[in-house]
Image: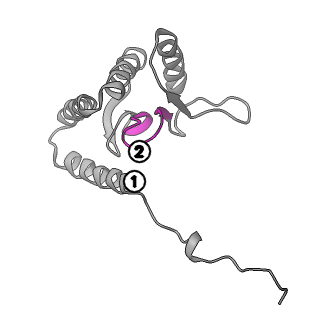
């Protein structure tokens, strides 16, 4: 063996699994699915899911709540065919039961910024590469206009 060469310890590179926040989000998703299964008619499910989103937004810390309220309003105004629902404990907007976009608060995963994300169902394709997640630190009139265009494109 060559002198001075050390072998990296496997202890420092062990997989630690999911973070506490990720585990909590998965648990919330399981509860969301159970709650949805217990609901009555399709119309009841839509109304209750929309109320769940508003409740979740109201529970957010102030800066995230303000952004989430504005994002919610922009999505509802520009893509009314999307149904609000919770998805891993986050406000999300679905078409035919499948999530197209979502808002993730900064607080949820102890992140520096909130995120507006889009699933692969969103029709945002642009050449060979395009963004599906956008950092939000403030929702200004300009940001609202950009969100409106993205949401309209996502469902067109």
Dot 1 alpha-carbon crowd within 10 angstroms: few under 14, some 14 to 19, many 20 or more: some
Q: Residues within 10 Å of mark 2 (few under 14, many from 20)?
A: some
Whole-number angstrom distance, CA of label 2 to CA of label 1? 8 Å
From this viewpoint, which residue is outermost toward the bottom? 1
Chain part drawn in magenta: 97-117
Q: Which sits in the foreground, 70 or 50?
A: 70
Q: Residue at x 28, y 50 (%)?
A: 28
Residue 21 sits above or below residue 137 on the image: below
Residue beneath the point at 36% across and 28% down = 64
Name the quadrant containing residue 6: bottom right
Callout 2: SS: loop
Which residue is most to the top? Answer: 141
Residue at image coords 42%, 34%: 102
Q: Is residue 57 above or below residue 149?
A: below
Q: Label 2, on which residue? A: 109
Q: Is residue 31 left or right of residue 69?
A: left
Find residue 81 and name its label. Answer: none
SS at circle 1: helix
Question: In which quarter of the view is residue 12 placed?
Answer: bottom right
In this orientation, which residue lies closer to the viewer: 32 or 36? 32
Q: How far across and down, in percent of the image, does residue 80 sit?
A: 37, 19
Query: Is 68 left or right of 101, judged from the image as shown?
Result: left
The tally of labels here is 2
Q: Position of residue 74 (x, y in %)?
A: 40, 17
| Farthest front residue in view | 4
Q: Which residue is mark 1?
A: 22
Question: Whole-percent x and y of residue 149?
Answer: 53, 16
Circles 2 and 1, Cβ within 8 Å, touching? The answer is yes
Q: Relative to residue 143, is residue 79 drawn left or right? A: left
Percent from the top left, x then y, of residue 77? 38, 14
Question: Is residue 100 located in the magenta-colored stretch of the structure?
Answer: yes
């Amino acid at each position: 063996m060559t002198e001075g060469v050390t072998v990296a310890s496997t202890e420092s590179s062990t997989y630690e699994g999911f973070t506490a926040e990720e585990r909590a989000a998965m648990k919330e998703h399981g509860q969301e699915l159970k709650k949805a299964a217990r609901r009555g008619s399709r119309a009841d499910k839509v109304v209750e899911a929309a109320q769940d989103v508003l409740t979740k937004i109201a529970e957010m810390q102030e800066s995230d709540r303000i952004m989430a309220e504005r994002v919610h309003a922009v999505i509802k105004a520009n893509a009314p065919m999307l149904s609000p629902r919770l998805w891993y404990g986050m406000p999300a907007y679905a078409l035919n039961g499948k999530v197209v976009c979502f808002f993730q608060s900064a607080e949820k995963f102890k992140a520096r910024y909130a995120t507006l994300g889009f699933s692969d169902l969103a029709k945002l394709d642009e050449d060979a590469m395009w963004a599906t997640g956008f950092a939000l630190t403030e929702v200004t009139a300009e940001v609202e206009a950009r969100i409106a265009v993205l949401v309209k494109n996502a469902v067109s």
